[in-house]
Amino acid sequence: MPLGCLFVGKCREAALRDAAELYALKLSRLARCDFVTVKDAPAACPPAEKPQREGRDILAKLPAGATPVLLDERGETWSSRELAARIKAWEDAARTPWFIVGGAFGLSDELRGRAKNGGAMFSLGRITLPHELARVVLLEQLYRAASINKGLPYHHD
């Protein structure tokens, strides 16, 4: 099950970085997963322009043929089992989902358009999470989905 994760910015908080690394390691034991990080837009960049600058960098790093799955508050909420089923469906269709977590100022409209035309928009819920915490939650959910798809007992109904 190939997956990709593309993150904006380094995880600066040690506890969140450790948690992200833990779930990335656990996930890597169950699935092939590529991880890519792009730099945050410069601090001097106006906040309204940051998503566009970061979006260009994301698109430049997104592999050809990737299925972009944006973590976005406007996206659909999926249960862990629904996420697992979607990953399985992408795998069966020989598509590689790339889960994208934007920076502190969100994602560009260009990325949203790309996700709407051949990808997906996924929301972790109606709450707002810092992007570093969203990274941890995403990685845990990808690990959980891989466990579900492998029939392992990590997920309890």
Image (cartoon, rainbow, N blue to C red):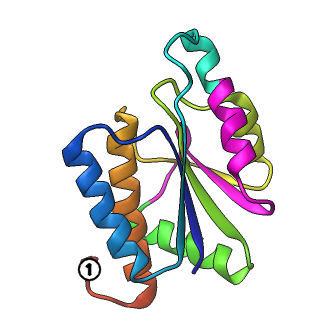
Residue 39 vertical position relative to residue 50 in the rendered view, above or below: below
Residue 156 appears at what percent x and percent y? Answer: 24, 77
The residue range painted magenta reads 52-78
The residue lying toward the viewer, choosing from 140 and 59, is: 59
Q: Locate residue 47 relative to residue 136 in the image: left or right.
A: right
Q: Residue at x 33, y 52 (%)?
A: 136
The residue lying toward the viewer, choosing from 124 and 29, is: 29
User: Can you see residue 144?
Assistant: no
Q: Quadrant of residue 107?
A: top right
Q: Residue at x 59, y 21 (%)?
A: 50
Q: Amino acid at mark 1?
A: Tyr
User: Can you see residue 150?
Assistant: yes
Residue 42 vertical position relative to residue 141 in the rendered view, above or below: above
Residue 154 appears at what percent x and percent y? Answer: 26, 80
Q: Residue at x 71, y 60 (%)?
A: 67
Q: Is residue 107 magenta?
A: no
Q: Which residue is mark 1?
A: 154
Q: Locate residue 133 relative to residue 38 in the image: left or right.
A: left
Residue 118 vertical position relative to residue 16 in the rendered view, above or below: below
